[in-house]
Image (cartoon, coloured by chain):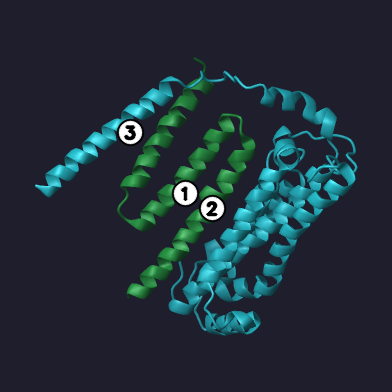
Chain colours: A green, B cyan
Amino acid sequence: MNSLTIFMNALLVLVAVTGLLVALARNPRRQVFLGSLFGTELALLFFLWQAPDVAVAELAVGGLVLPALVLLTLARVEGRSK
Amino acid sequence: MMERFRQIVALVLGMGLFTLLIWGWSALPNFGNYPGPNGDIVNRSARAERQVQNAVAAVVFDYRGFDTMGEEFIFLATVMGVSLLLRKPGRTTDEQAEGEQVIRKAANQPVDSNDAARTSGLVFVGLLVVLGAYVALHGHLSPGGGFQGGAIVAGGWLLIYLVGGSEMFHRLSSVVILDRVEALGVAAFILCGLVGWLLDGRFLGNWMPLGQAGRLGSAGTIFALNVLVGITVGAGFILLLREFIKHLDEVAPRRRP
């Protein structure tokens, strides 16, 4: 088992743990940032599993655009409730 | 009693799902063991057949270009659906006036993002937009492509909101232009497919000159479709962000994320 394999296995565990944290987060705002982190980790995972096209798409959509849309929605919802 | 019953049901279903997952996982092929012939065939022949370096792009925009067209339609339908939901009825006929109204309202709103965010945002707007254009233009040469490039451009565009607030964002993201750019991008994709049908005998056939693999102007329609998809996706995502930001301004003009 070389160092890359160890790193890839560690990344798998990290993705699983982050995914669990996203599901367990009660605060929506914290959930958004955890979700963004999850997307970034997934992008790294795709890259290491030799799917760079998917990695770039995941990085842009999962790490950037989706969290931005959810944050904007949250700001809108919180603005209404006040 | 009810609570207890629900817990038992959840436990049984959860264990069943877990068993199914383990069962499916146990039958997965080993890591690196690729059973199908198609990937190897494409890897071997795509470069010679289409003068393309990125075999994924050859599959997505040529061999299975029809699927990508379907995805374009899904994307267009999504953006249209969100716009329909978020644009107020009665004002959609005069979008220009609507935009100006929002800008006027937003102009009164104080920009309360800090200097560090604004300065670094200003630096990264240009860099990200250029990077996105690069990724879309080089889809046939390197990882990435139209969708990825368009999404990166939109991500960079979002920084305008961080730098200049919604006033500047709305001024630079004209809904009239974005709507048309997105629709024309999809229309040009279909037109390219129809021309392929006429000249090459099959819908989305690669009818443009193929050039030499490794050059920017190579791979024929793969290059052209990448650019078109980049334009469509970029405009679509900016349109989505714009609708969300506009909605935020209308409801709570003083709030910023």
| CB under 8 Å between discs 3 and 2 | no
Question: Where does the image place residue B253, in percent across and percent down from the top left?
Answer: 46, 79
Q: CA distance from mark 3 to mark 2?
A: 32 Å
| Looking at the image, residue A75 lies above or below residue B15 | below
Q: Is residue B35 above or below residue B130?
A: above
User: Looking at the image, which residue is at 67% across and 26% down?
Assistant: B39
Compared with residue A6, is residue B205 higher up or lower down, i.e. above or below?
A: below
| Left or right of residue B215: residue B2 | left
- Asked whether the viewer can see residue B120, the reply is no
> Between residues B121 and B234, which one lies in front from this camera angle?
B234
The residue wearing badge 1 is A36
Specify the farthest residue to the left.
B1
Q: Chain of mark 2?
A: A
Do the numbered discs 2 and 1 sit on residues whose CB atoms are within 8 Å?
A: yes
Query: What's under tag 2, amino acid-wise?
Result: Leu
Q: How many marks?
A: 3
Residue at 66%, 58% in the rendered image = B234
Return the mark for residue A64: 2
Which residue position is annotated with label 3?
B17
The chain that hosts pointer 1 is A
Q: Is residue B184 left or right of residue A9?
A: right
